[in-house]
Image (cartoon, rainbow, N blue to C red):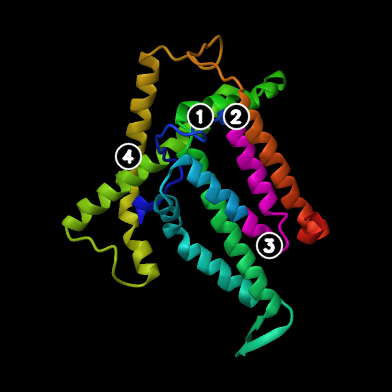
Amino acid sequence: MIRNITIGQYFPADTVIHRLDPRIKILIVFMFIVSLFFIASFYPYALILAFIVLTVKLSKIPFRYVLKGLKPLWFIIIITFIINVFMTKGEVILELGPLNITKEGIRQAVFMALRLIFLVIGTSLLTLTTSPISLTDGIEKLLSPLRKVGVPAHELAMMMTIALRFIPTLLEETDKIMKAQMARGADFESGNIINRARNLVPLLVPLFINAFRRADELAIAMEARCYRGGENRTRMNELKLNRNDILAISFSTIFFLLIILTRYIGIRGIL
């Protein structure tokens, strides 16, 4: 399960999606997330799915690799679905003792499940198609106007990128620790959910020790290379928008505006 998490990982390739400016990709993902919360019917989800399929095709990332990032979240998705089914009031279609399944509850549950699935896939595609260095530069450029009010744009961008990059590293460390403890007789697979959670507690101490050790090694490496933050820092490759970037942000802006408008005038009104 740990190996199935794709957020924070980078899939190297030379495609039109990988070559897009990181600022453009960050803005597109932001619009993607915002549009998901405006969807009020099932038809726009089909358009969102088509957008994701097109992006995956252009990025040449295997669909199995993208979808495997959902495996660790199936439990959360199922719990969210069940909660919405039984907690949403409306027209009762089935009674199960003190609990009622309503028509509105099923609709809301499907909406929430689809929203979580698309959120995970959309954010995963950002890190899968953008290298950590490019992601840092993109975030810093987008935050640079806030420097006038004292916001440390470069430091914030660096911390966010390092945090994303450390996700797969810490997951790999967790997997190694689990295998080492299982070889010594530890059991992480039997018992109920509570027992499994308790069995994971011994993982925390070595995991935190390894995390602090890696953070210290990273700090020493950055100091050895005379890293001094964002002041007077130059770059080998400056970010510049090209024709593909303009086309991508223009198409995405129009597309997600249409998705948002479906909440107010419906899909038939737009078409």
For label 3, count other residues whose C-alpha is less than 10 Å away and answer few (under 14), some (14-19) or many (20+): some
Q: Which amino acid does label 2 sit on?
A: Asn
Whether pointer 1 and pointer 3 mark residues with C-beta atoms closer than 8 Å, the reply is no
Q: Which amino acid does label 1 sit on?
A: Arg
User: Could you tell me residue 62's position as x and y percent?
Assistant: 40, 48
Q: Does the magenta stretch include residue 181?
A: no
Secondary structure category for the residue under label 3: helix
Q: Tell me the quadrant of the picture where the C terminus can be found.
A: bottom right
Q: Which of marks 1 and 4 is nearer the N terminus?
A: 1
The span from disc 1 to disc 3 (Cα, nearest Å) is 31 Å
Residue where numbered disc 1 is placed: 19
The span from disc 4 to disc 2 (Cα, nearest Å) is 45 Å
Whether pointer 1 and pointer 4 mark residues with C-beta atoms closer than 8 Å, the reply is no
Q: Which residue lies furthest to the front in this view?
A: 271
Select label 4 or label 3 by which is in front.
Answer: 3
Q: What residue type is labelled 4?
A: Ile
Residue where numbered disc 2 is placed: 244
264 with respect to 259 (left or right): right
The label number, if any, that marks residue 209 in the structure image: 4
249 with respect to 209 (left or right): right
The image quadrant that residue 153 belongs to is top right
Foreground of the two, 64 or 74: 64
Position of residue 157 relative to residue 208, above or below, is: above
Secondary structure category for the residue under label 1: loop
Q: Tell me the quadrant of the picture where the N terminus can be found.
A: bottom left
Position of residue 81 relative to residue 232, above or below, is: below
Whether pointer 1 and pointer 2 mark residues with C-beta atoms closer than 8 Å, the reply is yes
